[in-house]
Image (spheres, rainbow, N blue to C red):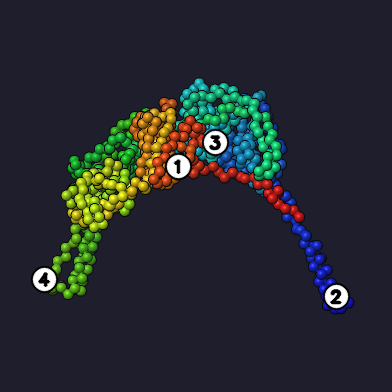
């Protein structure tokens, strides 16, 4: 045997030994995919006659609580916050309120109990016991939605009061209570037989009583009487992702009603008070109120004549009001004393006049403003003289006199080069106008690329936005127009003068738009339909004889919302819990609409009777469901060798 042959045999043996030694390495065994389960408790699950206020729960493995403060709900509600702890395999719940006799207690953990290693949740886990000789087992469930936009309301309390005392909601904590999850879903457990009123409450002060008008609230229009029925559900076992292995039919107890829908709203309440006043500059000041009002406050100058002294710009709800002072002898003062009279609610909620005295001072004194103006003038004068000397036209004996330029009023355009045919031409200004010379405004239409002819127009102030003006003319699709404004056409309240301005615009052709025809059954005339971009209304129409049409719709994805405008004010109106008045009903078309240019769409499949919780498309639902824990069969995915 040669030496080379011996070396080859030795290398081959070493390679075989290495291969045998690395056939596999331990990887910790199979994954734990089972949720924890309860193995013991004090008191026992469903126990009767319990008097202990410390509940201990033992599980088969180490567990932890996931977001217990938000998920765990105890019923009857506890005024003093209970203490909930987890340690290893144990959860302890200590109640500090005195236990009520003959009462079923439920501790609803939802899916807060998870195993410590893999986070497998023990879903829909509730621990119940009774201080009496019977256990109440009925339950009701449903959904809470925001009334104005059908958003699921997460974390709001849902509670019951027995029928018979209509004032209980305002005086006593709920008898049974639950809390909604991220889908707005709730289940109230441990209910005794009887008839109940159902409420939802965003309980700001955590006393389980509706005692603050600012709290979001909902009520069911009729009482409910919980009951149980026997039902069967199908449980499908899959051989693989495409093949069904078996379908098992499993009997269970179904608690009804289980499809309640509560619409949450905030009641109109009068918290009218003057939050603050500001005078950012000498010539104007603003008043900020906590709430809007139907009427403007009354102002009286105590150290000046306030008759016709202001240009007043209120916000849409009259909760912010800007006052521009007309007279320079007034606004040059460093302090103005103003008496403001406005309406505030008394103890019964009735609006009564109240008068406050305000001392309004700007951030800068008049002396400082004049000094800054003088410094700016001197600096500009020096630059003027330097420029004259550079041009070599400076005469020492007859030096040129620097004249400050007239303050300029900027014209701001709110238009694009490609305009929508149904949108007016719009300009705005930074301060109110003193005068307008419409003869200095010219609107013309293009005959060809270089020739324009004048056309008639109208200039109108905006009804909704201050210092904004619209120009109306016979605009035509796919045609070019020019707006020209001579200098000094607009003069501002404080003397600033506008410069010359011109702008060319072109309106989109009719081929750029879609038309949407809607036919909706079961709604009356005057009902409002809103065309939505995301969840924001961009256009609205009133239904007449079950129909309405949106013209000049740009291509894109849209959604639809319907408002039952009962009082015809063009707005969505909230409800009144005490008067048992529900907010105006809102519905969504459950799908998006992909509209293309040059197409006319007829939509007649809007069924507003489908369940409200299924109407709003998920794409525009802001309150998304919490990410559900996906149970992966990771053991089946692993390959052991």
Q: Give the mark, 4 or 3, whose residue is nearer the N terminus.
A: 3
Q: Is residue 291 above or below residue 256?
A: below
Q: Position of residue 78 (x, y in %)?
A: 56, 33
Q: In this view, does 497 lie above or below 320?
A: below
Q: In which quarter of the image is residue 259?
A: top right
**Relative horizontal placement of residue 192, taking residue 638 as reference (left or right):** left
Towards the viewer: 331 or 498: 498
Instruction: Select label 1 or label 3 by which is in front.
Output: 1
**Residue at left 22%, top 60%?**
373
Q: Give the mark, 2 or 4, whose residue is nearer the N terminus.
A: 2
Distance from disc 1 to disc 3, alpha carbons, whole Å, reads 28 Å
Q: Give the mark, 1 or 4, whose residue is nearer the N terminus.
A: 4
Task: Point out which mark residue 185 bears.
Answer: 3
Q: Where is residue 392 in the image (x, y as percent from the top left)?
A: 17, 75
Towards the viewer: 55 or 410: 410
**Residue at left 19%, top 41%?**
308
Q: Position of residue 570 (x, y in %)?
A: 35, 34
Task: Point out which mark residue 398 bears.
Answer: 4
**Relative horizontal placement of residue 142, taking residue 373 as reference (left or right):** right
Q: Is residue 215 above or below residue 4?
A: above
Q: Tags 3 and 2 in contact by the CB under 8 Å rule?
A: no
Q: Give the mark, 3 or 2, whose residue is nearer the N terminus.
A: 2
Distance from disc 1 to disc 4, alpha carbons, whole Å, reads 75 Å
Q: In which quarter of the image is residue 344?
A: top left
Q: Where is residue 547 in the image (x, y as percent from the top left)?
A: 38, 33
The residue carrying mark 2 is: 6
């Amino acid at each position: 045997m040669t030496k080379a042959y011996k070396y080859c045999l030795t290398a081959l043996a070493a390679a075989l030994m290495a291969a045998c030694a690395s056939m596999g390495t331990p990887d910790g065994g199979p994954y734990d995919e089972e949720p924890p389960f309860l193995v013991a408790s004090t008191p026992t699950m469903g126990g009767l006659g319990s008097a202990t206020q410390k509940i201990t729960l033992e599980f088969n493995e180490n567990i932890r609580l996931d977001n217990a403060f938000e998920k765990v709900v105890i019923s009857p509600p506890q005024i003093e916050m209970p203490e909930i702890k987890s340690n290893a395999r144990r959860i302890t719940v200590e109640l500090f309120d005195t236990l009520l006799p003959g009462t079923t207690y439920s501790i609803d953990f939802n899916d807060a109990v998870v195993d410590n290693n893999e986070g497998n949740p023990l879903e829909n886990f509730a621990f119940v016991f009774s201080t009496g000789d019977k256990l109440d087992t009925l339950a009701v469930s449903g959904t809470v939605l925001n009334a104005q936009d059908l958003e699921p309301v997460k974390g709001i309390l849902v509670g019951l009061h027995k029928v018979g005392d209509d004032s209980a909601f305002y005086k006593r904590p709920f008898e049974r209570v639950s809390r909604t999850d991220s889908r707005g879903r709730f289940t109230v457990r441990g209910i005794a037989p009887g008839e109940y009123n159902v409420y939802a409450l965003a309980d700001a002060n955590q006393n389980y009583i509706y005692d603050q008008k600012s709290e979001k609230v909902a009520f069911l229009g009729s009482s409910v009487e919980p009951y149980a029925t026997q039902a069967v559900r199908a449980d499908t076992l899959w051989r693989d992702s495409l093949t069904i292995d078996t379908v098992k039919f499993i009997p269970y107890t179904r608690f009804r009603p289980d499809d309640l829908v509560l619409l949450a709203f905030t009641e109109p309440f009068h918290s009218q008070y003057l939050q603050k006043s500001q005078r950012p500059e000498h010539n104007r000041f603003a008043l900020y109120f906590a709430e809007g009002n139907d009427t403007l406050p009354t102002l009286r100058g105590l150290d000046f004549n306030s008759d016709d002294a202001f240009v007043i710009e209120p916000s849409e709800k009259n909760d912010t009001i800007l006052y521009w002072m007309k007279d320079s002898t007034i606004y040059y003062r460093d302090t103005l004393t103003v008496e403001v009279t406005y309406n505030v609610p008394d103890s019964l909620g009735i609006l009564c006049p109240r008068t406050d005295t305000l001392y309004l001072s700007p951030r800068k004194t008049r002396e400082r403003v004049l000094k800054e103006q003088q410094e700016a003038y001197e600096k500009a004068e020096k630059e003027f003289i330097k420029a004259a000397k550079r041009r070599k036209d400076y005469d020492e004996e007859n030096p040129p006199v620097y004249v400050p330029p007239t303050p300029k009023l900027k014209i701001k355009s709110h238009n694009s080069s490609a305009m929508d045919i149904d949108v007016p031409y719009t300009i705005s200004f930074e301060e109110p106008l003193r005068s307008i010379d419409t003869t200095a405004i010219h609107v013309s239409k293009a005959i060809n690329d270089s020739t324009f002819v004048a056309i008639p127009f109208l200039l109108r102030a905006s009804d909704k936005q201050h210092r904004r003006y619209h120009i109306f003319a016979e605009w035509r699709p796919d045609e070019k127009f020019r707006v020209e404004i001579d200098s000094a056409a607009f003069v501002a309240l404080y003397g600033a003068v506008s410069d010359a301005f011109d702008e060319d615009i072109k309106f989109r052709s009719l081929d750029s738009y879609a038309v949407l025809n809607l036919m909706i059954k079961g709604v009356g005339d005057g009902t409002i339909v809103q065309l939505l971009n995301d969840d924001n209304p961009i256009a609205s129409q009133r239904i007449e004889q079950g129909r309405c049409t949106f013209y000049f719709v740009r291509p894109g994805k849209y959604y639809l919302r319907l408002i039952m405008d009962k009082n015809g004010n063009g707005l969505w109106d909230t409800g009144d819990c005490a008067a048992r008045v529900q907010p105006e009903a809102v519905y969504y078309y459950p799908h998006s609409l992909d509209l293309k240019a040059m197409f006319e769409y007829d939509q007649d499949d809007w069924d507003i009777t489908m369940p409200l919780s299924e109407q709003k498309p998920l794409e525009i639902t802001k309150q998304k469901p919490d990410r559900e824990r996906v149970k992966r069969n990771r053991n089946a995915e692993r390959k052991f060798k």
